[in-house]
């Protein structure tokens, strides 16, 4: 009597499982690529900011604790959003692999994973400040496309889904020919869908609109006031070029607002509402001013500060026209992406050059600096004054509304603190003994800088030569010709503003209302 073959034991079955990990990685990766490609295509048609990656990234930014945000800004600087996107990409890749490996063993687990992928994107899109029901569509179509791709893969990798017709398979049941053809088709579809999404998304881009803006002749930047730039090598220039101006905001995708579509609504605690178009704003009396902006997250000696020439219309004149209720304590300004800023009304209307700016250094605002219109209020940190892509201003009270950063613990009132920085020489520089130029910038916006002092190794303070003052709303350069002797030296700088207040030596972090302390560097002299 012939012996019948014993069925494979669980151990033998499990021994074959690792051979499905490779196909599972491919399946998961291609299904995820198709899902993302189709989602991007749909977002390109509907709204680029509804892309699951952008929506989830924006939600991640909002949910990130302050200590981690501060770490990201300090560590990665202007690249913080690229790092976030890279992190999202790595996370998606890992999740895709897990879904793929699970799917070739238990297909329903794969479908469940793709459903979760879609639901996360839907939730992120709908809970964004500017979210609309249609913004859920990219995540839905992406999830369905990924599920369809998985359904096409299963007959090639899951024996229970194999077709009745005889197929040539590997020992683990993989139909190689079908597997590779399906994978190639999926990869091509992902590339085509993603590329098409990029093309469609160009409809929302504002580059052409910006190029079509013709600024009045007063916007052509003239030379800075004589003496405002000491032209010392290594010293920050008085006017910061647009390409070098710092950027700190919560927008993962730079909003694309066309000038011809832009509207600004002023409402709330006013006598009558007003809505302005870009052309109406351009036709109002315009002012051009040099104003230094800096971010509250700037560390002592940090680079989140810049000085530019801004063109715009006075915010105070617009507020006078709408008739502000005397009890309206704050202006709540909103960006097109839903970001909010709370500015003290009294400060915006005290005669300083608060403006709705349309140009920066003689050209229309760059897209990532707020085109077509941004708000500026000199003397306040940006998070309470400098709304980019502004589309709404509501007169309100501090009790009635907390703006974006206030809800996260930052101070409601945030006047810029008196500060100074050493630009040259750099920290840990090796210098030759002799006379060495030590130079930098100092700022106390809307109070102005009266003096700057430098000291070496806790010695006496040495008064610095100051550049000419442009206005009290700009930084000033300073220079000390230091007699450097051999050895390691500690250099420290302090500033005094025009009220007589001396920059504090007490060290404090940026949170909750700006960093304090002397900027200090160590240099080596030989």
Image (tube, grey):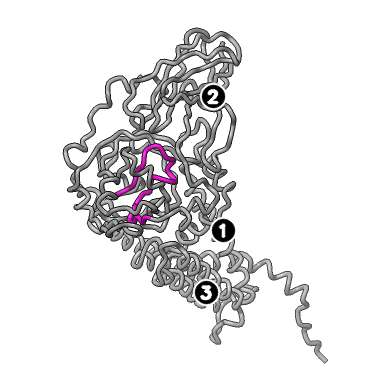
Q: Nearer the viewer, residue 349 or 443?
A: 349
Crowding near the residue tagged with mark 2, few <14, some 14–19, many ≥20 C-alpha atoms within 10 Å: some
On the image, the x and y values in percent for residue 285 come to 19, 43
Query: Which residue in the structure is indicated by mark 2?
Result: 427
Q: Is residue 506 magenta?
A: no
Which secondary structure, mark 2?
loop
Q: Nearer the viewer, mark 2 or mark 3?
A: 2
On the image, the x and y values in percent for residue 164 come to 55, 87
Q: Which residues are magenta?
A: 373-395
On the image, the x and y values in percent for residue 341 come to 42, 51
Q: Is residue 382 magenta?
A: yes
Residue 91, labelled with which disc?
A: 1
Asked if residue 325 is positioned above or below residue 385 in the image, the reply reads: below
Q: Nearer the viewer, residue 401 or 182?
A: 401
On the image, the x and y values in percent for residue 275 come to 25, 58
Q: Quadrant of residue 504?
A: top right
| Distance CA(mark 2)–CA(mark 1) | 37 Å
């Amino acid at each position: 009597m012939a012996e019948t073959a014993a069925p494979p034991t669980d151990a033998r079955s499990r021994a074959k499982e690792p051979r499905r990990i490779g196909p599972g990685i491919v399946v998961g990766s291609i299904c995820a690529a198709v899902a993302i490609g189709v989602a991007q295509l749909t977002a390109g048609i509907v709204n680029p900011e509804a892309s699951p990656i952008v929506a989830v990234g924006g939600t991640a930014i909002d949910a990130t604790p302050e200590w981690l945000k501060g770490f990201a800004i300090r560590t990665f600087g202007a690249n913080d959003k690229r790092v976030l996107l890279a992190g999202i990409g790595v996370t998606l890749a890992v999740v895709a692999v897990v879904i793929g490996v699970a799917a070739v063993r238990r297909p329903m687990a794969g479908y469940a994973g793709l459903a979760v992928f879609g639901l996360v994107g839907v939730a992120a899109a709908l809970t964004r400040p500017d979210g609309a029901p249609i913004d859920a569509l990219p995540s839905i179509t992406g999830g369905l496309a990924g599920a369809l791709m998985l359904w096409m893969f299963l007959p090639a990798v899951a024996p229970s889904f194999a077709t009745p017709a005889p197929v040539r398979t590997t020992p683990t049941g993989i139909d190689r020919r079908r597997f590779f053809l399906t994978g190639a088709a999926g990869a091509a579809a992902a590339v085509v869908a993603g590329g098409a999404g990029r093309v469609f998304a160009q409809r929302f881009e504002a580059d052409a609109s910006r190029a079509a803006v013709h600024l009045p002749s007063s916007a052509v930047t003239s030379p800075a006031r004589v003496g405002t730039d000491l032209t010392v090598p290594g010293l920050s220039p008085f006017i910061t070029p647009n390409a070098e101006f710092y950027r700190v905001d919560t927008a993962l995708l730079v909003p694309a607002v066309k000038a011809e579509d832009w509207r600004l609504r002023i409402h709330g605690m006013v006598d009558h509402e007003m809505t302005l178009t870009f052309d109406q704003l351009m036709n109002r009396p315009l002012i051009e001013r040099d104003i230094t902006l800096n971010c509250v997250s700037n560390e002592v000696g940090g680079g989140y500060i810049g000085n530019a020439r801004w063109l715009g219309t006075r915010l105070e004149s617009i507020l006078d026209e709408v008739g502000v209720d005397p009890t309206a304590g704050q202006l709540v300004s909103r960006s097109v992406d839903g970001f909010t800023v709370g500015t003290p009304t009294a400060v915006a209307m005290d005669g300083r050059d608060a403006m709705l700016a349309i140009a920066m250094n003689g050209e229309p605002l760059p897209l990532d600096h707020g085109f077509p219109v941004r708000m500026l209020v000199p003397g306040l940190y940006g998070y309470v004054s400098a709304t980019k892509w502004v589309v709404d201003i509501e007169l309100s009270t501090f009790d009635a509304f907390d703006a974006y950063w206030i809800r996260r613990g930052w101070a409601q009132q945030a006047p810029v603190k008196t500060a100074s920085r050493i630009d040259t020489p750099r920290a840990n520089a090796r210098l030759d003994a002799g006379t060495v130029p030590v130079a930098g910038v100092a700022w106390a916006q809307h109070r102005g800088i009266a003096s700057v002092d430098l000291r070496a190794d806790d010695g006496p303070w040495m008064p610095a030569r100051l550049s000419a003052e442009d206005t009290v709303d700009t930084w000033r350069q300073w220079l000390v010709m230091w007699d450097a002797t051999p050895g390691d030296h500690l250099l420290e700088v302090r500033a005094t503003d025009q009220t007589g207040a001396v920059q504090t030596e007490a060290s404090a972090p940026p949170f909750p209302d700006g960093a304090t302390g002397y900027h200090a560097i160590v240099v080596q002299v030989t």
